[in-house]
Image (spheres, helix red, strand yellow):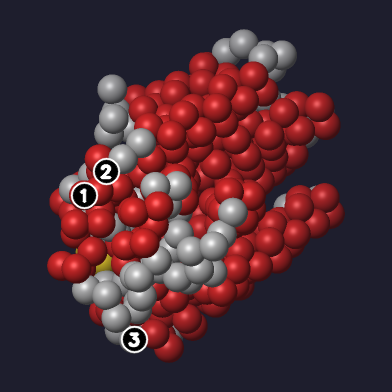
Amino acid sequence: MKLKSFYSFLTKDLEVIENELLSSVQTKDPLIREAGIHLLQAGGKRIRPVFVLLSGMFGDYNIDRMKPVAVALELIHSASLVHDDVIDNAELRRGKPTVNAKWDNRIAMYVGDYLFARALEIITELDEPLIHRVLSKALVELCLGEIEQINDKYNFDQSYRTYVKRIKRKTALLIAVSCQLGALASGAPESVCKKLYLYGYYVGISYQIIDDLLDFISTEEELGKPVGSDLLQGNITLPVLFAMQNEELRKKIVKINNQTTAEEIKPIIYEIKKSRAIEQSMNISDRYLQKSFHQLEGLKHGKARTSLYNIAKYIGKRKF
């Protein structure tokens, strides 16, 4: 089944979100407008808005209150992708040219900054101090995560704890906050907001681990970028950490640097795929998925809870 089938009842509301996203970049500056539209129309699952809307169903659901939260979080996510692509000097995302490849790094950074600013402007439509505090704190953590990713490039002495902390800031936090803010905006009880936050956090960790795995075992066509891009760009992911437990393989991996070519890295990618690193990483991902399922227990039964369960299950099994 396709991911969208799990929340098909949200189709009309997601169309509202999509229109608002495109409207948010309709600025007088033609360059920012063009780059913003290019980025938003490049695809994407809009999974963060989906989490906002589903979580809002545990309270008094109102699309007018959900809309600014969903749009703001998707803009923040899009902005972080633009900045990531600049950091990684990436040319493709989802099979299409990145903003920095189509224009340049300076334009890309300004576009990312603009999207961050628009997100903060849009969220002010809700007069709820707690929502603003939660989002502001998440933004700080997200920026720290981007800085950590830069500092840790080609650092092969990282620990598992460092990796998890980084992907928490890079991915899991924004998904967790999407769930939390959707619930908060609908007036859901504090206990429900907490459960949904933790659900989003555990799903987010699992989601990123799977993404890191797919970078090795998927195809360029499916990824929309070259296989092994993360390792080539110096981003040390969980499969690499596990692969380096093999001393012979570690000796080859630690030689990778910013001068290594895609052709030179192919044999290493092949060895990582053959190693136990893939299975070990899958097991860790599955542990986090089980934790996410546990958080759904105690929440009211209904299509929102069923959708959250099915989305998590889908995330854990995609392309495997």
> Toward the viewer: 75 or 254?
254
Sequence-first tag of 2 and 3: 3
Residue 291 located left or right of residue 47: right
Quarter occupied by residue 305: top right
Q: Which mark is residue 270?
A: 1
Let me know if residue 286 appears in the view.
yes
Q: Find the residue positioned furthest to the front.
A: 248
Residue corresponding to mark 3: 104
Residue 26 located left or right of residue 176: left
The amino acid type found where label 3 is placed reads Asp
Q: Position of residue 319 (x, y in %)?
A: 27, 34
Q: Position of residue 72 (x, y in %)?
A: 58, 57
The residue carrying pointer 3 sits among few (fewer than 14), some (14 to 19) or many (20 or more) residues within 10 Å by Cα, namely: few
- Spatial CA distance of label 2 from label 1 is 5 Å
Look at the numbered disc 1 and give the secondary structure of its residue: helix
Quarter occupied by residue 93: bottom left
Q: Are marks 2 and 1 in contact (CB under 8 Å)?
A: yes
Residue drawn at x 62%, y 39% as measured from the top left: 201
Quadrant of image for the C terminus: top left
